Amino acid sequence: MNEHDSERMKGMLESLGYTETAEQQDAGLILFNTCSIREKADSRFISYLQLAASYKRRDPEIVIGVGGCWAQSVKEDVFRRFPFVDVAFGPGQVHKLAEFLTSESLTAQGFFEFEGFTGHLPEKRARSFQSWVQISVGCNMKCSYCIVPSTRGRQVDRPLDELVAEVRAQVAEGVREVTLLGQNVNAYGREMRAGAGRGSFAQLLHELDAIDGLDRIRYTSPHPQDMKEDVVLAHAELDSVCPHMHLPLQSGSSRILKAMRRTYNRERFLDRVALIREHNPDIALTTDVIVGFPGETEEDFAETLEVCEAVGFDGAFTFIYSPRRETEAAELVADFVGHEVSVERMDRLVEVIQRRAGEQARRFVGRTLDVLVEGSSRTDAARLRGRIGHGKVVNFSGLAEPGEIVPVAITSATSQTLAGEMSLLARALT
Ligand code: 5AD
Ligand code: SF4
């Protein structure tokens, strides 16, 4: 979501006539789009902000802006702590940046209402054939570790017809793959008032699938609580909905899930996985896991390992619990799990995740799969890099342009990436 917002900020600045400088210190405007999901992002940002301040000491004309979730979480305090900041705004107020930059204002200003969709602003895509589409902002869940509900507010959805029109326009410009974005995408439509723009997430998938020229639909992230049969069936029935689902587990212990206020338990999660696989036997499943949540015992953690072992995810993002200001879990100081214990658990978790992901990846070897070419391989410029529908990166030999979808025979697999060769015969037949 943060990356999407950055693309929109860039798009908005370009529409105001700004261009990017090659060197940071040559910029007349230095803008930070901050993330607050874990503490590490915060601390890294503060050191960059200090660097920007040093440029401004040399050239007081430089404008420094701070947007995003960190700004939202500290609000006006930002001007007290960092008096060199000229403008600050939360994720719902990005459009106000344009107002500030085009006004004659000399005083520092802050904008922190939950008001707009960054998805309404001009975009600047990193790749012309892939786009993000923000379907909703905010989140109505109350996960006890999570800062998002306080930085992005309650969930507000964009009307279905508006989203379909936006994707249609993107496809006309050459987009082949969209990633639908929301904090809880499968709760889409639930809180909308009846009317023309109303629809469920599954309906949205159906309508987008009907757009000619759109090859791939991805989305992130759904909540296991709201993963119902209609969305599961959409994966099975709709060609453009990718055979990949990112379904955040967070913990395999029902006791910890309850303390996290995740609203499902271990059995319910496993039951969702069974339903998904019943209709989509080949689907790739990835997840998010937090270790060291306050009060997590060795037994709780062992249950997380068990679930990861049993599901066999195709990949996972793993995080050490990070206390966030004004969240319920951050109050449980007496139950904090020490850093050393968390690191040790993380190592054991990563071992299970990688081993199972490696085992899963072997099912692709020997198959010829469509790959959306993204560019050249990061490790060998003579080879190409792209993704299969399941989301796995493939490095392969062949000749193709970024944005093309080509058949690739998969020859080997590791837990992270696949390798292969472009299949010329298959290509000639397509
Ligand atoms: N500490 C650690 N991980 C967190 N996440 C969200 N909040 C925290 C936190 N306080 C993780 C969750 C979520 C992902 C986006 O970030 O796993 O799914
Ligand atoms: Fe945070 Fe939970 Fe909402 Fe995800 S569902 S954004 S983890 S509160």
Image: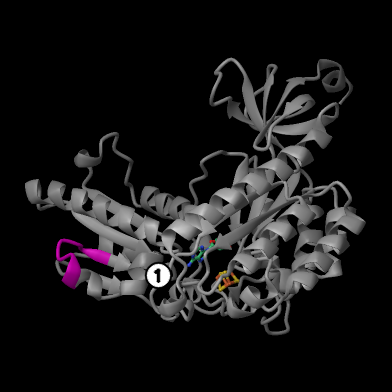
85 in the magenta segment: yes
Q: Residue at x 70, y 41 (%)?
A: 355
Confirm whether residue 114 shows in the render. no
Image quadrant occupied by the C terminus: top right
Task: Say which of 152 and 297 sits in front.
Answer: 297
Please say if 82 is above or below 208.
below
In the image, 324 versus 136, the foreground residue is: 324
Task: Indicate whether 169 appears above or below 336.
Answer: above
Residue 55 covered by magenta stretch: no
Residue 205 appears in the figure: yes
The amino acid sitting under disc 1 is: Gln
Seen at 36% across and 73% down, the residue is 73
Q: Would residue 251 be found to the left or right of residue 87 on screen? A: right
Q: Please give the range of residues in magenta.
A: 80-87
Question: Can you say whether 96 is above or below 259 in the image?
Answer: above
Q: Nearer the viewer, residue 394 or 191?
A: 394
Quadrant hosting residue 413: top right
Q: Residues within 10 Å of mark 1 (few under 14, many from 20)?
A: many
Q: Residue at x 68, y 37 (%)?
A: 415
Percent position of residue 261, x then y: 61, 79
Label 1 element class: loop
Q: Which residue is mark 1?
A: 93
Q: Which residue, as the protein is rendered here, is positioned at the far front? A: 298
Instruction: Name the residue: 89% across, 50% down.
Output: 281
Residue 382 pos. (x, y %) = 59, 15
Quarter residue 74 falls in: bottom left
Q: Main secondary structure of the magenta part?
A: loop
- Left or right: 114, with 87 as reference point: right
Query: Could you tell me residue 301's position as x and y percent?
Result: 62, 63
